[in-house]
Amino acid sequence: MNTQDRSIVLINLSGHDRPGITSAITEILAGYGVQVLDIGQAVIHDTLALGLLVHLPPQAQHSPVLQELLFKAHEWGMQIRFTPVAEASYEHWVAGQGKSRYIVTLLGRQITAEQIARVTRTVAENGLNIDRIHRLSGRVSRSQMDNPGRACVEFSVRGETLDTAELRRHFLALAGELEVDIAVQEDNIYRRNRRLVVFDMDSTLIETEVIDELAREAGVGDQVAEITERAMCGELDFSESFKARVALLKGLDASVLEKIAQRLPITEGAEKLVATLKSLGYRTAILSGGFTYFGRYLQDKLGIDEVHANELEIEDGRVTGRVVGRVVDGECKAELLQEIARKEGIDLEQAIAVGDGANDLPMLGLAGLGIAFRAKPLVRQTARHALSTLGLDAILYLIGFSDRDIEEQWGGLRSGRKK
């Protein structure tokens, strides 16, 4: 190398990991006054990959610093490589830090090589470059590999993508083909600073539509279920269809409400998600086109802060077939989200909204992270993010939590409850 070539050097060290390697390497560099321009390290199955981009000051460019590093690597039985970096190449790399950054999250019951290959190919075809790949899900025992659990890999990418909506459409189509979920979001300060989460209730926090449960008790199940399905798919106006369904409940004995509440199937991961969010200081709310009776039941069960839903009118112990006040439709949900955010002093970019129906789209569009959860096709295609393969607690992956983070927090919460 000539003097100019030696000024910036990329050092790559790999081999069996052990304590003190990074410390020893940087202490050698420190002894020669070397400046570290960038550093990255990863360990997979006790194998270390350490990279340092360094600037050698003039007095170090003809010193034995690289030879000393080579001897140390040989002593450890590790591989080390030195690559000179031209000044123009370095400046091009520096200029790249101004490019847009995105987080692509791949989620599924299992993650395969094919899924990673297809996702990374899509990233490359859209002019994006992968900076970092990080597994958020926990390690899996060999005895459990044939039993689908949960898996998540996060890709940090950068570049100038001209159409993020088109990129999301590519990932949505790929997710359907591979039977996984793929989310892409800007890597900005808001992603790591969410403070409010609002949930739809029916078919989101619970795995049923309460109005269908009420209709079965009233003997009008098929009629109401058909209207519900068409409304959730966006084929009918929600408010009008809702009033029509409630009218069919006229005369129902109000005592069945408690019986239905007791058997509500809580969605996979809901309890863990809400408890974890609450312990971290998030504000939570139910914004539901369902009924306040069941919303308050879930509020008590899950520890949710507030509930906004429809008040089912009851007179003389029977349902009248009417609701009290304004119907909580899509427009109302969006207004409630804005009202809660304003009241709490929270930017909408810091809000997460989760829902499954067409009436959830307005609030999903307003929130910084709007998630269509196990949603109808129209909703999945319209929302910016969709989750279908895992439980609600997979939302924690989208805000950057790993299984280790989640289990530490969740384990502490469970221990506290037992005391």
Image: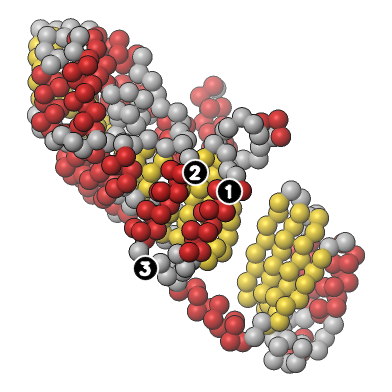
Residue 123 point in image, percent of width and height: 49, 60
Disc 3 designates what residue?
162
* Number of marks drawn: 3
Query: For the residue marked with disc 2, what is the amino acid?
Result: Leu
C-alpha separation, residue under disc 3 versus residue under disc 1: 26 Å
Residue 205 point in image, percent of width and height: 35, 29
Which of the 4 quarters of the picture holds residue 79?
bottom right
Is residue 233 shown left or right of residue 324? right
Disc 1 designates what residue?
114
C-alpha separation, residue under disc 2 versus residue under disc 3: 25 Å
Is residue 251 shown left or right of residue 265? left
Residue 253 point in image, percent of width and height: 18, 7
Which of the 4 quarters of the picture holds residue 293?
top left
Which of the 4 quarters of the picture holds residue 373?
top left
How packed mark 2 is, by other alpha carbons closer than 10 Å (few <14, some 14-19, many 20 or more), is some
How packed mark 3 is, by other alpha carbons closer than 10 Å (few <14, some 14-19, many 20 or more), is few
Of circles 2 and 3, the one toward us is: 2
Q: Nearer the viewer, residue 119 or 160?
A: 119
Q: Earlier in the sequence, mark 3 or mark 1?
A: 1
Is residue 354 shown left or right of residue 113? left
